Amino acid sequence: MTTFEVEAPRSVVNNAGISTTTLKNVGDRQKTAQRLLRSTADRSYDGELDINWDAPLDPEKKWIPDHRQTLYGSRLWATLTDEQRRTLGMHEMVAILSFGIMAEVGLSTMLLRGVLESDEMTDDHSRYALAEVAEETRHSTMFSRLVNLSELEPYRQPSALTWLYRVMGFIPRGPSVLAGTLLIEELLDRFQREAMNDPELQPHLRQMMKIHILEEARHITYAREELVRAIQARGKAANAWHRGLFALQNMLVQPVLVNPKVYRSVGIHPLKGFLTAMTSKEYRSQAIFRSEPLVRYLHEVGMIRGPVTTRLYKWSRSLPDDLLEQIERERSAA
């Protein structure tokens, strides 16, 4: 059994092995795939074997750090007992894991679609896409086992969001689809890189996070480079459409990472809990924390540009102040 010991303070974000892809170092498509395939062979894990599922949960351990819970800092939060906060945290984590299963199944569908549409189904680029599907499947298996361990029912997404996932299969592959892939991968990656350092969390959860971030770094590299290539292969009008479409995705996905039904676990009406979370003074800092590495990269490669796109990002409240100021200066100088 592989074990990971993490003793860093919970406030530290572990950047070990993080993707360092930037606009300047996007490499040859096949060479990148070859490198990622080698890394997959050298550093892959199996949640079925590398997590001790027979070990019992620790009733004193949390499922999510307090400061990352959706109600943290609100008046409602102040009314909750420690036990209620721990209960709500477990439900919020199960909701995130349930969302993650759906998102990774959608991502795998897109990867398989890319292989089917490729002119070279047997090249290294296609082979890595298949290798990533295998890893995403194992990740979903880990998520489902953690949900089972909690003894809670998975949180199903609203029917409208499920419908949207189905419709995305008809959207032409391009920058918005690839940026959407990064949206899911990087939001979860950022959260887990901090949470895996927290000794107050369930050991099973920390082990899962360790495995997930090590493998997701490859997936992020793959998607970041593909995003740049997709932008370069299209004209101004097509890229403007994809920028707006993804900005809308970002604005909609951020609030639904946690299903509002979780609030029923502590006697709060879902609508009241959702509105409290969305209007909390902590919401923007949470959105920025989750999104910062992604939005900085998206700005670098040209995905945050133009009045409509910028307005949608402002509404999402996910742009750091310095980046927002930079975007405004660029608009004024244009």
Image (spheres, rainbow, N blue to C red):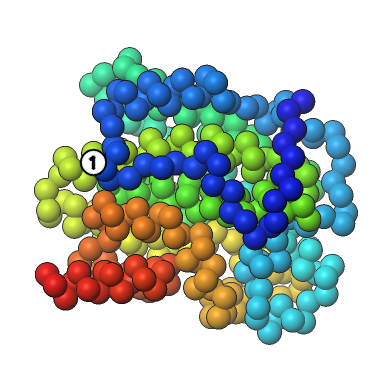
Q: Count every numbered label the image shows and give the total.
A: 1
Q: Is residue 314 above or below residue 13?
A: below
The front one of 35 and 106 is 35
In which image quadrant can residue 273 be found? bottom right
In which image quadrant can residue 306 be found? bottom left
The front one of 79 and 299 is 299
Is 94 placed left or right of 266 in the picture? left
Is 302 placed left or right of 185 in the picture? left
The residue that appears at 70% across and 56% down in the rendered structure is 9
Q: Position of residue 157 (x, y in %)?
A: 55, 55
Q: Position of residue 99 (x, y in %)?
A: 56, 51
Q: Is residue 126 above or below residue 58?
A: above
User: Residue furthest toward the bottom?
Assistant: 75
| Quarter occupied by the N terminus | top right
Q: Which residue is mark 1?
A: 230
Q: Is residue 325 above or below residue 128?
A: below
Q: Tell me the SS state at disc 1.
A: helix
The residue that appears at 24% across and 55% down in the rendered structure is 302
Residue 253 seen by the camera: no
User: Residue furthest toward the top?
Assistant: 122
Residue 227 seen by the camera: yes
The residue that appears at 40% across and 54% down in the rendered structure is 294
Q: Position of residue 317 (x, y in %)?
A: 42, 72
